[in-house]
Image (spheres, coloured by chain):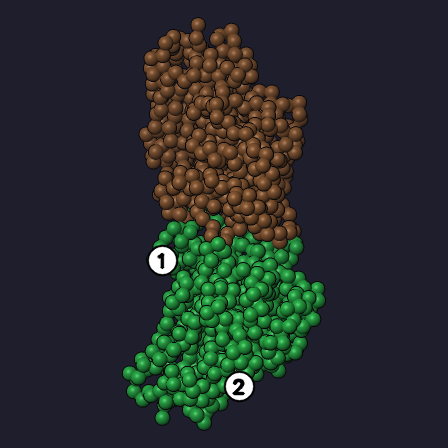
Chain colours: A brown, B green
Amino acid sequence: MSSYTLGIDYGTNSVRAVVFSCENGEEIGAQVFNYPSGDEGVLVDPKDDNLARQHPGDYIEGLAVAVTGAIQAARASDGFSPDRVIGIGVDTTASTPMPVNEKNEPLGVLPDWKDNLAAQAWLWKDHTSADEAARITGTAREHRPHYLAKCGEVYSSEWFWSKVWHCLNTSPDVFDAAHSWVELADFIPAVLTGKTRPEDMRRGVCAAGHKALYAEDWNGLPDKQFLGLLDPKLASLRDRLYEKAYDLSESAGGLCSEWAERLGLPEGIPVAIGAIDAHFGAVGAGVREGVLVKILGTSACDITVAALERQLPDIPGIAGIVNGSVLPGFYGIEAGQAAVGDIFNWFVKHVCRGDGSLHESLTAEAEKQKPGESGLLALDWNNGNRNVLIDPNLTGLLAGQTLHTTQADIYRALIEGTAFGARAIIERLREYDVPIERIVCCGGIAEKNPMLMQIYADVTNCTMQVARSGQAPALGSAISAAVAAGKANGGYDDFVSAQDAMTGVQDTEYQPDPANLEVYNKLYSLYRIVHDGFGGVSQSVDVSGIMKELLEIKRAQRGGEG
Amino acid sequence: MSSYTLGIDYGTNSVRAVVFSCENGEEIGAQVFNYPSGDEGVLVDPKDDNLARQHPGDYIEGLAVAVTGAIQAARASDGFSPDRVIGIGVDTTASTPMPVNEKNEPLGVLPDWKDNLAAQAWLWKDHTSADEAARITGTAREHRPHYLAKCGEVYSSEWFWSKVWHCLNTSPDVFDAAHSWVELADFIPAVLTGKTRPEDMRRGVCAAGHKALYAEDWNGLPDKQFLGLLDPKLASLRDRLYEKAYDLSESAGGLCSEWAERLGLPEGIPVAIGAIDAHFGAVGAGVREGVLVKILGTSACDITVAALERQLPDIPGIAGIVNGSVLPGFYGIEAGQAAVGDIFNWFVKHVCRGDGSLHESLTAEAEKQKPGESGLLALDWNNGNRNVLIDPNLTGLLAGQTLHTTQADIYRALIEGTAFGARAIIERLREYDVPIERIVCCGGIAEKNPMLMQIYADVTNCTMQVARSGQAPALGSAISAAVAAGKANGGYDDFVSAQDAMTGVQDTEYQPDPANLEVYNKLYSLYRIVHDGFGGVSQSVDVSGIMKELLEIKRAQRGGEG
């Protein structure tokens, strides 16, 4: 008899629930719920562009509407019935923490606090806490340098402690009223499993490790002495947070009766530990050792895993390495590029003043070129560099322009620049014994731009594939639910079996072309010189040959045409 | 009683004759003649893009039509009559040499040769002789390094010996039929003065020095031994060229009876020694010690002079220093930038795909910005670097782009990049004791773009002025004629008096703004690091601070706005 799991994916503007078949990962029914509050679901402050909050009530309302809608849609499928749903998984944006009371109710839904922006969920892209982030970084640099080694030497304003501390500094009434703070990724499983006390929740190691400086190496969250250096109230908050965070080898609990009834699902089915959307996206795209999952959108998020036996050291320039954050028994490794699609959009919109269709015509033109034929070399830093330099104060660079350089030349060079950035990350991971053999991409760009995929294959010397599911995060959540349920209940006992059955890649894949690789190896060596020089890896570089070598490659590639 | 001189300016597509008042340099009458042959006057070869020749018959026909037309037009002016014309001056493109027979007739006009492209005038922009140029450079580097020191270490394919030798190599029949070779700048005065034997002509030092390696230091043209290393036939040609080239302290001769009659001008009036258009343009713009004349067009040509007493050494990176090539008694110094307007046109046309009107709207937008506000830094090398690096194999560079960088940001950065290139030349000249206090510009850009002029003033810390005459080369030619005629005949005895009377600048001038200068000093120091690194001045540079400093300057300038 068929079995099904539910994946629930909390995005920035909406929540999507999807019913998947455990047999083959097929999508059986789905429903999206757009958050009704604020500006497309985001509470903003006209006086402060950095502020981005969400109303926790939207999450709860969306949970009911999206899940019941998805189940209703799934009913059209032969063999489906709600009592065949064997588990639920949840992924969300992060760090999106919210203050809760002793009953685990978000302050933001309570009458006293509902109009207070500080009492709402602090959305991942809220940047109000820049000062606190800088002070956390500074204090850690002096007193706990090993904390920084795990998060790329800079603690971000987007992360848990920055936000909580900013609340303490600017809205102490909210901070004082909060019994605890809960990440959205932990909150939804707590709701579904009826955990009415924060101390009863099982928090996930994914958000804890990647956003809150949690690590087994130092017995969990940052120690109280360190937090006390920031503010004594943060030290005391630590007692009301958690000692242990869980990976996916255990579940968050069973579906409580209240929500079983509300959703029309069997009571007691397991709810998986919640995780960050990108990480479950990687699971849904088939991540395993040797496979890097690349979520290609406005920016790029790279996720891979490495067996614990490898005993990975800190990897310089790679921000996030967390035991169990993606798959149990593996280090979860997160890296990324601060801008990819954003760079192409910038060029089309701001430089060419074109509309979206220009992407297609420039791609068609650029596709006719050989590698290096433009004579151009671009750094992909228009939004700073996330890895491996971890420096937001870097900017773009384009070299090699002549009086004949065209829009398509530049467009292709920008794509190549992002591919070089991707290669820099891969090379760094390999240097530290993280195996990468192929890349599975998710996201619109991967489906829409075969030229980009071929360039990435040629530059990285990796096979490039596209994940079969267009809803990889929801699928990853559903897979975690199938594993939480176990084989005996129609699921799987381990992630390898579950991923083998439920994930896949599209038929079209992109193999590196050896001739192109050779040219790109030369261009990449030039990229590295410029990268290391402008990126501060080296205080002394020889860039005197860059332009001449670009011209030589260009001439050789053009000459080869005729 | 008023007196007048004629300036005749041979350009790439046409010849222009202008009658000027000796009293004040006023333009009394003018006539343009478009060369009828080829593609807008240029003979081309569909099989060879590098080829650019001109039909000498066009020059002679144009001489008659343009001069008689200018005189006819001048008749409308009170007080003018042709017998009050006291001299003629000529400027032309260079190096534009042509083969002539023993009667000083260009082979290109003779029935036997008129259809032979090699027998025509070899226009300045003919690039067929690249191999010969490289071999001349190589041979000189080994055997006559001091030759190269005078021409920027590289002998150009655009210059005299490259062209003559290429003719010898590819059209030996033409070479053998040629009794001598004559620059256009020397040919027209020879025609006007009735010199029917090449050995009777007075060649000008301007084209000789800047294009044919002529220098008094080594007794004229390159020695026969050196030429013999290239080809024995070049060594024997030297005997049929010239031993001495003349500066403007003497004239080329008197107007011959035949041309006096044909033009309706007094027989015997002096015809000045011919010179290169840019050099007479400088004269017409008022060049003197301390004044740099900048001819701003698609590229930029910088001309200034320094008194011979300064005993200038070779100046590294400055291509042309020739005793008397601009004004007698002074070194004539020529430098330039390979692309200026061409870069702005490239950006508008190829990158923005805009039409000419986009220049205006981008200028209007960019004008609102403070220096450094764009956060961008550009190298002005889209067409290589003429000075001070003398390297055609360099290309453009733009750094500092974010996801918000606009067309206007880039447009302004490109203008600033050319201003930095201009400053690099000025600094080099000053280092070697060439005084520069103000800059007088000619060319459309100077008149049309006040923002550019202000940026140049702020970057170079020089007052920027615009020459009063829109026909500076013709005016310079007319001034040379007035000096050749002398005060006794209604002209002047020296260039200072002639220029004081006949040249001037427009009322609007651009003064450096101290606050802007301060910011540009910082940006220029960043430009120099990138310039020296990519330009090969230094094999080791520290570019690690460039992007951060650009961001700091940007933030400071934007912050200062509110």
Looking at the image, is A553 positioned above or below residue B481?
Answer: above
Q: Residue B369, how many percent across, how many down?
A: 41, 58
Q: Is residue B32 left or right of residue B239?
A: left
Distance between the alpha carbons at the discs numbered 2 and 1: 45 Å
Q: In the drawing, what numbered circle is on residue B250?
A: 2
Q: In the drawing, what numbered circle is on residue B356?
A: 1
Q: Residue at x 38, y 78 (%)?
A: B64
Amino acid identity at mark 2: Glu
Please determine if labels 2 and 1 lie on a single subunit: yes
Q: Crowding near pointer 1: few (<14 within 10 Å), some, many (20+)?
A: few
> Disc 2 is attached to a residue of which chain?
B
Mark yes or no: residue A23 visible: yes
Looking at the picture, tell me which residue is in the foreground, A514 or A132.
A514
Of the two numbered discs 2 and 1 in the rendering, the one whose residue sits closer to the viewer: 2
Lower position in the chain sequence, tag 2 or tag 1: 2
Quarter residue B159 falls in: bottom right
Looking at the image, is A314 positioned above or below residue B167?
Answer: above
Q: Is residue B313 left or right of residue A1?
A: right
Q: Crowding near pointer 2: few (<14 within 10 Å), some, many (20+)?
A: some
